[in-house]
Image (cartoon, rainbow, N blue to C red):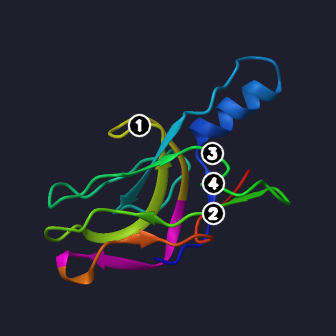
């Protein structure tokens, strides 16, 4: 999957702003969950994930190994993220996102794919290559 530059959702932007300006302490989650959505990326963090057919979010440890240090206001993925092998059709995927829970939870960042992709069992395991997820603040 090849993504375009992504962004922080309103949820994460508000938490970071409140943290920076003395309102509320924000503690990043220890685990992050990479998911796929059939909706376009949006600031509200609304997603429509595939249902069934072996779909589940990819789990990563939130550390320096997963994402490189920020530079020039951007954060870039440093690892490849793999999803389970689809057991059927997952649908037309438009967006990759990062959430703070295995199911539900809060969507932190979103990145649209350069081109939407049909994900199904005969295409192999979906993956996001290192460097393909790029987020900027604002």
Label located before the other in sequence (4 or 2)? 4
Q: SS of the residue at dot 1?
A: loop
Asked if labels 3 and 4 touch by Cβ distance under 8 angstroms, the answer is yes
Side of 87 where 23 appears, left or right: right
Q: Which mark is residue 101?
A: 1
Q: Which residue is mark 2?
A: 78
Side of 122 where 10 appears, left or right: right
Residue at 54% over, 62% down: 111
Label 4, label 3: how far apart the Cα atoms are: 5 Å
Label located before the other in sequence (1 or 2)? 2
Q: Which mark is residue 63?
A: 3
- Of residue 5 and residue 71, the one placed in the foreground of this image is 71
Residue 14: quarter of image:
top right
The residue carrying pointer 1 sits among few (fewer than 14), some (14 to 19) or many (20 or more) residues within 10 Å by Cα, namely: some
Q: Position of residue 137 (x, y in %)?
A: 73, 51
Label located before the other in sequence (1 or 3)? 3
Task: Choose mark 1 or mark 2, whichever is in front.
Answer: 2
- The residue segment tinted magenta is 111-121
Side of 119 where 133 appears, left or right: right
The prevailing secondary structure element of the residues shown in magenta is strand
Residue at 14% over, 61% down: 53
User: Above or below — where is 108 with respect to 15?
Assistant: below
Label 1, label 3: how far apart the Cα atoms are: 16 Å
Q: SS of the residue at dot 2?
A: loop
Label 1, label 2: how far apart the Cα atoms are: 21 Å
Label 4, label 2: how far apart the Cα atoms are: 6 Å
Q: Position of residue 72 (x, y in %)?
A: 86, 60
Label 3, label 2: how far apart the Cα atoms are: 10 Å
Label located before the other in sequence (3 or 2)? 3
């Amino acid at each position: 999957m090849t993504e375009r530059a992504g962004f922080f959702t309103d949820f994460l932007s508000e938490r970071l702003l409140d943290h920076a300006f003395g309102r509320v302490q924000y503690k990043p989650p220890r685990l992050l969950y990479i998911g796929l959505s059939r909706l376009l990326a949006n600031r509200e963090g609304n997603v429509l994930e595939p249902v069934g057919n072996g779909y589940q979010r990819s789990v990563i440890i939130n550390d320096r190994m997963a994402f490189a240090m920020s530079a020039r206001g951007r954060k870039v993925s440093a690892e490849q993220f793999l999803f389970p092998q689809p057991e059927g059709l997952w649908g037309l995927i438009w967006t990759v996102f990062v959430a703070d829970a295995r199911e539900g939870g809060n969507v932190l960042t979103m990145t649209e794919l350069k081109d939407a992709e049909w994900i199904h069992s005969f295409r192999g395991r979906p993956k996001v290559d290192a460097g393909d997820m790029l987020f900027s603040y604002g």
